[in-house]
């Protein structure tokens, strides 16, 4: 048993934490949140130079990490600082899917992602699919040597900034069958592709994406026709490790801010943290924090397992993080009082990041159901 | 024991329903049903409609132009208004300041201010909390120094709800810095147009400009704007805080909120079936509904006592704690029901003139979830309420 990070990961964590503490201040983040683009291109390239994106890919893919613990280290720090830049969407999901399925030509795009010069978005969820990964109504059909895509994609994070969308579409099978789903690279600006963009509550931007007879060459397909679902599940598993780690990092910040506030804020002539009613609740927060950290370790440590074991561990972790995160966010706000309700105070953003992770790739109940099903299997 | 309303109460309820069906502006109700926030114009219009009917001030005596309803009637009115998605009656003038003026104000103050509250001439806001005086309100520092026939006021108030619309503010100010905390406070009425007052908006975490900071720099306030006696303001402040508490449980809002959750859960599909049939989601909804059913009866039990003149004591604190927990749980269910469509920033979906981003049955539920974290913080946080309950019931207080 050894719960220490390797030297490489420790160095990555240290340098990323230092960079974000220096550069990703509350004021800097608030400026990003109020901006039009939803993220900072300067921060993005600086972090790419620091190797943050490369850490999310294996050596064979052109990176220097890519394992569950690499993902956890990076996203814990991103969560701790409340980073809104689209590492999940461009790198882990977009770049990860191309790396997993792409041809040699397509793999070249991964290099651009690692260099920080290409953004991607994973256009998979649909208005009626909720958290069901296999439910894809968008269709792909061959016509005159091309592929024609029709359908609608919901809450596609980072779609406006993406140079390429990775669009899932059904080539065969019923609307909720795993078989028959393919992925296609659709360059931004392709005729028939329409984006309706909007800001997200927790920062960043997303779009409703409409595909109206969008034509792409057959070479835009990633991997074999109708066989993308396994890769989608594997990448979403990685995304779930990232989301769990991000929420855990953000919970640490929420707990730190709350602890500081409890011993700074005075009412009735003494720091409010000296009132036992609050002190005990703060203690509970720290206990849940340790649970969350262990849940992330469990999930990250099993990311390379066979799918059934991998997904069971991840479902358990995300269920726990969903519960602990809600408690952490709500209690942190409550123990602060009114100040935590204000947009400019750091905790407001951190609390939104925590709670909103519960709406990506399955909420607390979804993961509970998955955990039950996978435990029975 | 009889759990049903009397024939008179049923007749009253039907009258309220008929009135709401006829007079509540449709667009305003639709805006609120979709989770939007009515603006100043919508709120003023609704006040005017209620005033014309004589229903704007349910708690006021008829002598002052009120409806003089008993606690049960007021409860029925509030429930029906919430169910119909009517705007809330803005409480600062009508149910906070007015009772204080009626009990402690001069005849001249009553004659001048009360009619202006009813006809909408004045929009009042509350100057109680300060940056350093939240739960410990009596530690407030805003100073008022008597100079001839004026007070000179300096200091800062915060969390001033809808202060951006107000032309008057009632304030707790410190007039005797040497007295024991509670004994040096006075209750002042201040015209917001007086030089030296600055209102700065505080943007809340859901993006709404709902509360403000109000800064006072050498603000001259005529001495006739003092309510009651100098240094007795804490007594009036406590009277204000305990007076209007019939709606503290927010049963009507919880019912309306639960209906919204059910409507969403019927439409939303999860794993091929309506979400409302999902056992985990259904269990969450059923649990909160069971809580709400019991709290509704607790609320009526306490209201019935109030109707025969027994003032609610710690029960009001109990209702505040339980009522806010239930409302917040319903907000949590609503964001869960929305699934990925909880993620968009609400301001766009909340606007009536914009197409919703996702399905039209999903409003700005996540924004509402975050905004309503305030419920357990303001008006005496739930920790303060628990302290009151424990102190009274353990015999450490009166």
Image (tube, grey):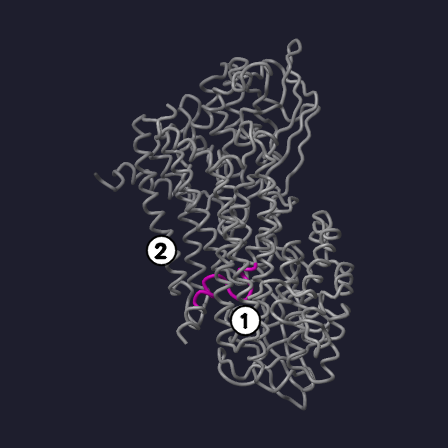
Q: Could you tell whether A198 is left or right of A374 in the image?
A: right
* Quarter-of-image position of residue A332: top right
Q: Secondary structure at mark 1?
A: loop
User: Hey, which quadrant is residue A304 in on the image?
Assistant: bottom right
Q: Is residue B48 visible?
A: no
Is the C terminus of chain B in the top left, top right, bottom left or bottom right quadrant?
A: top left
Q: Check the image and name the residue furthest to the left.
A: B1
Q: Which residues are magenta?
A: A357-369
Q: Give the distance between the C-alpha atoms of the residues marked 1 and 2, in whole angstroms.
A: 36 Å
Q: What chain letter is assigned to the residue under label 2?
A: B
Q: Is residue B336 above or below residue A118?
A: above
Instruction: Verify whether residue B186 appears in magenta.
Output: no
- What residue would you read off at disc 1? A302
Residue B267 pos. (x, y %): 44, 64
Spot occupied by residue B92 in the image (x, y as percentages of width and height): 52, 31
Query: Where residue A256 sits: x, y (%)?
Result: 60, 46
Q: In terms of image quadrants, where is residue B156?
A: top right
Q: Would residue A362 be counted in the magenta stretch?
A: yes
Quarter in which the N terminus of chain B is drawn: top left
Q: Is residue A363 left or right of residue A372?
A: right
| Residue A310 is at least partly visible in this image | yes
Task: Identify the residue shown where x is 53% and y is 57%.
Answer: A292
Q: Residues within 10 Å of mark 2 (few under 14, many from 20)?
A: few
Give B337 or A289, whichever is nearer the viewer. A289
Residue placed under numbered mark 2 in the picture: B286
């Amino acid at each position: 048993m050894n719960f220490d990070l390797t030297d490489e990961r420790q160095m990555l964590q240290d340098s990323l934490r230092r960079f974000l503490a220096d550069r990703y201040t509350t004021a800097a983040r608030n400026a990003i949140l109020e901006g039009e683009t939803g993220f900072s291109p300067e921060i993005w390239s600086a972090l790419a130079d620091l190797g943050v994106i490369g850490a999310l890919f294996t050596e064979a893919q052109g990176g220097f990490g890519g394992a569950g613990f690499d993902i956890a280290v990076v996203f814990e720090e991103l969560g701790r600082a409340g980073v809104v830049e689209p590492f999940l969407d461009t790198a882990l999901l977009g770049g990860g899917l191309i790396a997993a399925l792409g041809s040699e030509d397509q793999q070249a795009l991964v290099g651009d992602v690692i260099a920080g010069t290409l953004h991607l978005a994973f256009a998979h969820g649909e208005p009626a699919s909720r958290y069901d990964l296999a439910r894809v109504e968008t269709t792909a059909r061959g016509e005159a040597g091309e592929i024609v895509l029709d359908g609608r994609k919901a809450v596609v994070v980072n779609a406006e900034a993406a140079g390429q969308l990775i669009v899932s579409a059904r080539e065969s099978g019923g609307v909720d069958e795993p078989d028959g789903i393919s992925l296609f690279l659709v360059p931004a600006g392709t005729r028939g592709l329409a984006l309706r963009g909007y800001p997200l509550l927790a920062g960043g931007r997303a779009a409703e994406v409409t595909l109206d007879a969008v034509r792409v060459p057959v070479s835009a397909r990633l991997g074999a026709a109708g066989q993308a679902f396994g890769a989608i599940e594997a990448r979403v598993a990685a995304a779930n490790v990232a989301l769990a780690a991000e929420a855990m990092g953000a919970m640490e910040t929420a707990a730190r801010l709350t602890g500081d506030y409890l011993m700074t804020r005075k009412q009735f002539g003494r720091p409010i943290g000296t009132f036992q009613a609050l002190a005990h609740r703060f203690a509970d927060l720290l206990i849940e924090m340790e649970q969350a950290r262990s849940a992330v370790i469990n999930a990250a440590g099993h990311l390379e397992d066979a799918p059934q074991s991998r997904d069971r561990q991840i479902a358990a972790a995300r269920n726990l993080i969903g519960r602990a995160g809600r408690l952490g966010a709500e209690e942190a706000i409550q123990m602060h009082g009114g100040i935590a309700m204000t947009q400019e105070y750091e905790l407001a953003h951190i609390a939104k990041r925590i709670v909103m992770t519960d709406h990506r790739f399955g909420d607390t109940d979804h993961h509970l159901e998955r955990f039950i099903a996978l435990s029975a299997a | 024991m009889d759990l049903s309303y009397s024939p008179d109460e049923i007749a009253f309820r039907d009258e309220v329903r008929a009135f709401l069906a006829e007079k509540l502006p449709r667009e305003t109700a639709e805006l609120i049903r979709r989770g939007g926030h009515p603006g100043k114009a919508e709120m003023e219009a609704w006040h005017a409609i209620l005033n014309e009917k004589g229903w704007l001030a349910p708690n006021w005596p008829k002598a002052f132009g009120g409806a003089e309803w008993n606690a049960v009637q007021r409860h029925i009115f509030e429930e029906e208004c919430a169910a119909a998605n009517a705007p809330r009656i803005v409480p600062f003038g009508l149910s906070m300041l007015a009772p204080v003026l009626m009990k402690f104000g001069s005849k001249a103050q009553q004659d001048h201010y009360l009619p202006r509250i009813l006809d909408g001439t004045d929009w009042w806001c509350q100057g109680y909390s300060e940056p350093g005086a939240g739960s410990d309100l009596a530690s407030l520092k805003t100073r008022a120094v008597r100079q001839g026939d004026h007070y000179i006021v300096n200091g800062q108030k915060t969390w001033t709800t809808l202060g951006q619309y107000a032309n008057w503010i009632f304030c707790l100010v410190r007039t005797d810095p040497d007295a024991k905390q509670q004994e040096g406070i006075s209750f002042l009425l201040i015209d917001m147009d007086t030089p030296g007052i600055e209102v700065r908006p505080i943007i809340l975490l859901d993006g709404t400009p709902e509360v403000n900071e109000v800064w006072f720099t050498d603000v001259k306030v005529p001495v006739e704007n003092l309510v009651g006696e100098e240094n007795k303001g804490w007594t009036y402040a406590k009277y204000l805080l305990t007076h209007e508490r019939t709606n503290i449980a927010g049963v009507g809002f919880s019912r309306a909120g639960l209906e919204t959750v059910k409507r969403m859960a019927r439409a939303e599909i999860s794993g091929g079936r309506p979400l409302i049939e999902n056992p985990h989601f259904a269990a969450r909804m059923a649990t909160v509904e069971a809580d709400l059913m019991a709290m509704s009866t607790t609320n009526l039990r306490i209201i019935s006592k109030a109707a025969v003149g027994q003032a609610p004591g710690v029960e009001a604190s109990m209702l505040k704690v339980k009522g806010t927990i239930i409302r917040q749980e319903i907000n949590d269910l609503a964001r869960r029901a929305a699934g990925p469509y909880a993620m968009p920033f609400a301001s766009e979906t909340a606007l009536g003139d914009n197409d919703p981003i996702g399905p039209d049955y999903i409003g700005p539920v996540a924004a509402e979830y975050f905004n309503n974290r305030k419920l357990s913080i303001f008006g005496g946080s739930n920790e303060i309420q628990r302290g009151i309950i424990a102190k009274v019931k353990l015999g450490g207080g009166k």
